[in-house]
Image (cartoon, rainbow, N blue to C red):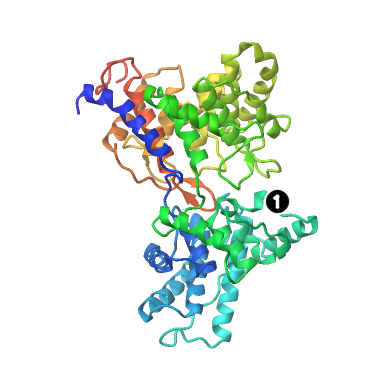
Amino acid sequence: MSDTVAHATYPQEAARLVARIDQDPWGSVRPSLYETARVISAAPWLPGEQRRIAYLLNEQAPDGTWGEGPERYRLLPTLSGVEAALAVLRRGTMPEETTRRLAKAVDRGLAALRALPTAGPWPDTAAAEILVPSLVTKIHQQLTHVRDDGMSVVGGWRPGPAPALPRGYDRGAPEYVARRYTSAGSLPVKLHHTFEGVAEYIPGALIPDGPDLLGSSPAATAARAAALSPVPAAGTVAALDAVAQRYSGLFPEAAPILVFERLWVAAALAGAELPAASLPTVRGWADDLYDPRGVRGAPGLMTDADDTAMAILVSSLVGLEHTPDPLDLFHNGSHYDCYIGEDTGSVTANAHALQALGSYVSRHPGTRHVYGPRTEKLRDWLVGQQRPEGPWPDKWHASPYYATARCVAALARHGGDHASAAVATAVAWTVETQRDDGSWGIWGGTTEETAYAAQILLSTTDHQPRHARALHRAETYLNDRAGSGHHPALWHDKTLYAPGAMIGAEILAVRELLRTRHGLHGRQTTLTDAER
């Protein structure tokens, strides 16, 4: 590819990405094994079950687990897969060959669960403290029914022993949480997205009903339908079927994700200069998504500081006069809670808040006396969350490169001298952890994490030769893999997922920043003498 063609690629590709997202009301994300298995178990009445059962069987790994990522991340999807297979077997509606395969999948899944670590640390995924014990209990119940009924599925098959509850989880947690809110007389919105974990303990009068997806979750919606009536409401069937139609009969962990997707894509592309052709579309997104009452990532979710901050930031980047006032809803005195009533804080949500406030003050210097003290507290809180060796961790992403890139971007622009040491430490850690092939990654090199690491190095004004060498190797790695659409799942929801359009936007933008980092009109393909 010539330098002239390469120079024209970024605005064209960015504009195409924005246009594609604008036309998709659901969002770019792969189906979730966990979520699809929950729908199989709770909603046998939904059209397309054969497709979902085939997916369940085909997705089981050779070691008997389900899911993506390292073994500790496979606990929840494997529990979900085993329970769903048992539920289908108990219904006795499958052809003999499918029945045999399901029985074998149960045996392999139970063996895999017994082989998983018995103790943590377990990943901080959404409501794992409720979902894991709930599924262990369900599997015990299913296996008891199989044995007590004298069920002979096929060829005298009898399942193996039930899995033990891994250490670190409380078997009574789902019932305890349900009792707590039953006593209060209402079910909070924060439990809607993971309602399947408490569904069987919530009295019918407290179960939120309606024709839409509950908490934007197919699993929660199917569990709600099963808890309310043996015959699902037509609206529920239509809502789930619409998602299934979009995802070829399967289900993602959240639907739709258009708020989250549009804001993150817009912010990423704006970092490398948003194409003029896309500006009206992105401005329309920001205007529609900004809400003075706070922004929610998807319908049925709680308002949160992360999406609110990003709506404010994107508004500022495209010249809209939306104030940071909605962030006040989440301020706790030193920083921002991602959700009201949050248990664990998020550094990336606060990094986005610092960027939003800093960008707004830069455009409105007269507001510095209002937001200056708050940004200083926020800066100090973020610096205090940094690990001694340089990175930041976060609960929304498995990789520290994502959180570190967000924190460095915020602190380098808006942290001043008070944050310079933290930024320098993060940059040094990033250089030191680059892999031999020029990539970065927590479990192996990925284009996504390499893009974040390159962002960290591009954020510094300390242009050392070793930084230039690292960036050159990163550029080569990313360019060699340009166009690769499959990304490992690294983002946290109930299990790991990969928001494809968002990841693609980050990679596209950083490749453009790398190409233009020396102010050259063509791509730099060799190191200067100083960089060597």
Residue 199, x across and y down, in percent = 65, 63
Taking 218 as reference, is 328 left or right? right
Q: 150 and 318: which one is in front? A: 318
Q: 509 and 217: which one is in front? A: 217
Can you identify the residue that label 1 sits on? 188
Taking 385 as reference, is 447 left or right? left
Q: Quadrant of the C terminus?
A: top left
Q: Amino acid at mark 1?
A: Pro
Residue 133 seen in this snapshot? yes
What residue lies at 47% left-to-right and 53% top-to-bottom? 252
Residue 422, x across and y down, in percent = 56, 25
Residue 54, x across and y down, in percent = 38, 67
Residue 237, x across and y down, in percent = 52, 62
What residue lies at 61% left-to-right and 32% top-to-bottom? 350
Q: List the single residue furthest toward the top.
A: 366
Residue 32 seen in this snapshot? no
